[in-house]
């Protein structure tokens, strides 16, 4: 199956053609924001990371920024640094360039202050837009898509309606040669044995290792995961334990073989179904999958979660009709029709699949129309 | 993969469509809409009366569940009964505890062990 996307020099295919302005450190957030106000067609993000981080935590932050900036939906990147940060902006830029991305980099100290940096950033962002805007969509294969799957604000209907329907769409994309990321590891605790059955022994072993890492973290903190996950909203929606939430969440990945288990923000090396180690926290998960190369995410929600990525379409699927009606402006698809008896799981699954293809061709889901810029990098160590 | 049928055909649903028993060996059913106290739910070969009002999406016990007994939904374990649960009772956080992610049950750290700083 085909769609029309933006072919990148490194061989990947984007479904959007964005110019991204990315601070390498939180100290550059203000400058990036001001550049964005003056060049509104450029996408800007802000974040509280990039300095006084060490070891695996720093590596993960850098990998996430590099992967996000090199997502196929991004045509070119302007990195703005301060000059003295841990996440040295030129080193970050080199890593992004090594992934085959068009990049410019500036530093506030080198530009001698805020005003000059904003002025220089405005020039460069405008130049990158001029360079990349003429690019046209060309024919691409659906197998070149990496789909993120996510459920947020889950309720008891997530595992009965929207997630099985998304699983159907995931199977269709895998059959077309594509890649599907199942993530939120804490929300696979209690369902990992079902996935492990569909994996080669080494892949299953890695999955069990990551699940153990989640539970070891809860043990080291001497708290029940239930305090934070399932959340109070999940519990109000009828979910009692993390196992129950996980069993419903795992449906999102469909029924194909599990090919690979990835660290946070790692790019999949295999086609088919892969698992990525992200937290259940929605924005960190979305950022991690997008940094791993996901051009599109389908996001199911029971309670009603509007979130969207700065650079990737996020398609919202409501698990129940009551919420779909209440939050109509934030939803694209109503899987509550499965409960209402007006549609089958496969019919809604086919609707989701068609939406994925349409979004690949340029159709904007509501989260994209709202221009959400939700961005958060998962931290695995303290600041020093 | 879930069967290519409507929910009512794919999964055993109570006769009035108010609740769903996802697998035959589940000891709870999911209420698909709010079930008032006293409602009778009839599944194939099984009848329970709701002892309290149960909100939509929440679970109702289909059989007596002893303290410590596993709660089954989707044909899988979703937790264990913290107390005795009667058929028709609301099954939720007040009478069910998780079996996984129970860091609260971990042994206390050894004296002198460094404090752990949690990172979500």
Image (cartoon, helix red, strand yellow):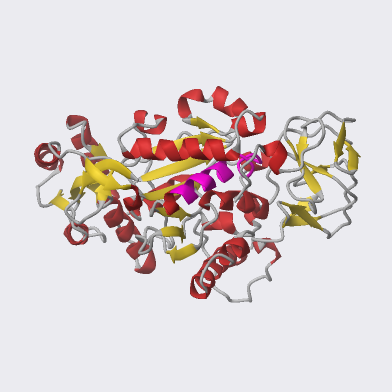
Horizontally, is A185 left or right of A372 in the view? right
Horizontally, is A292 left or right of A182 in the view? left
User: Is residue A307 visible from the viewing direction of this image?
Assistant: no
The mark tally for this picture is: 0
Front one among A241 and A121: A241
Looking at the image, is B77 positioned above or below residue B49?
below
User: Is residue B30 visible from the viewing direction of this image?
Assistant: yes
- The residue lying at 77 percent from left, 32 percent from top is B17
Q: Quadrant of residue B106?
A: bottom right
- The residue lying at 62 percent from left, 59 percent from top is A191
Majority SS type along the magenta span = helix
Q: Is residue A112 magenta?
A: no
Q: Is residue A159 magenta?
A: yes
List x then y, in percent, for residue A274.
45, 60
List x then y, in percent, for residue A77.
19, 47
Front one among A142 and A57: A142
List x then y, in percent, for residue A290.
36, 50
Front one among A300 and B13: B13
Q: Which residues are magenta?
A: A155-172
Horizontally, is B119 left or right of A289 in the view? right
- The residue lying at 26 percent from left, 61 percent from top is A86
Looking at the image, is A257 positioned above or below residue A201?
above
List x then y, in percent, for residue A253.
52, 52
């Amino acid at each position: 199956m085909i769609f029309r996307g933006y072919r990148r020099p490194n061989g990947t295919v984007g479904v959007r053609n964005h110019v991204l302005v990315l601070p390498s450190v939180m100290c550059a957030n203000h400058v990036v924001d001001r550049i964005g106000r003056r060049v509104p067609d450029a996408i800007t993000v802000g974040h509280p990371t990039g300095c006084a981080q060490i070891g695996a935590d720093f590596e993960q932050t850098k990998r996430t920024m590099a992967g996000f900036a090199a997502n196929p939906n991004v045509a070119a990147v302007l990195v703005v640094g301060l000059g003295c940060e841990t996440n040295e902006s030129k080193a970050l830029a080199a890593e992004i360039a090594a992934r085959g991305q068009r990049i410019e980099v500036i530093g506030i100290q080198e530009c001698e202050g805020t005003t000059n940096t904003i002025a220089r950033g405005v020039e460069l962002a405008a130049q990158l837009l001029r360079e990349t805007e003429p690019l046209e969509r060309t024919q691409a294969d659906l197998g070149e898509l990496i789909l993120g799957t996510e459920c947020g604000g889950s309720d008891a209907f997530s595992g009965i309606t929207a997630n099985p329907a998304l699983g159907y769409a995931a199977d269709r994309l895998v059959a077309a040669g594509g890649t599907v990321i199942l993530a939120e590891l804490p929300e696979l605790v209690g369902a990992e044995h079902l996935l492990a059955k569909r994996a080669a022994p080494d892949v299953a072993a890695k999955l069990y290792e990551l699940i153990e890492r989640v539970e070891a973290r809860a043990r080291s903190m001497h708290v029940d995961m239930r305090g934070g996950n399932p959340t109070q909203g999940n519990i109000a929606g009828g979910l009692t334990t993390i196992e129950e939430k996980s069993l419903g969440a795992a449906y999102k990945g469909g029924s194909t073989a599990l090919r690979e288990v990835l660290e946070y923000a790692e790019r999949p090396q295999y086609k088919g179904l892969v698992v990525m180690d992200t937290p259940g926290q929605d924005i960190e998960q979305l950022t991690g999958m997008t940094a791993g190369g996901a051009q599109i995410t389908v996001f199911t929600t029971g309670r009603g979660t509007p979130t969207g990525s700065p650079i990737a379409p996020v398609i919202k699927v409501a698990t129940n009709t009551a919420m779909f009606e209440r939050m109509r402006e934030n939803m694209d698809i109503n899987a509550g029709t499965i409960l209402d008896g007006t549609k089958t799981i496969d019919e809604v699954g086919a609707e989701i699949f068609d939406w994925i293809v349409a979004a690949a061709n340029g159709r904007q889901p509501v989260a994209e129309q709202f221009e959400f810029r939700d961005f958060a990098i998962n931290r695995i160590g303290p600041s020093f | 993969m879930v069967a290519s049928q409507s929910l009512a055909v794919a999964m055993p649903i109570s006769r009035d469509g108010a609740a769903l028993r996802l697998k035959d060996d589940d000891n709870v059913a999911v209420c698909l809409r709010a079930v008032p106290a006293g409602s009778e739910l009839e599944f194939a070969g099984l009848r329970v009366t709701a002892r309290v009002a149960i909100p939509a999406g929440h679970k109702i016990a289909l059989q007596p569940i002893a303290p410590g007994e596993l709660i089954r939904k989707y044909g899988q374990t979703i937790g264990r009964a913290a107390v005795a649960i009667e058929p028709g009772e609301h099954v939720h956080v007040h009478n069910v505890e998780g079996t996984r992610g129970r860091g609260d049950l971990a042994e206390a750290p050894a004296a002198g062990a460094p404090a752990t700083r949690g990172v979500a």
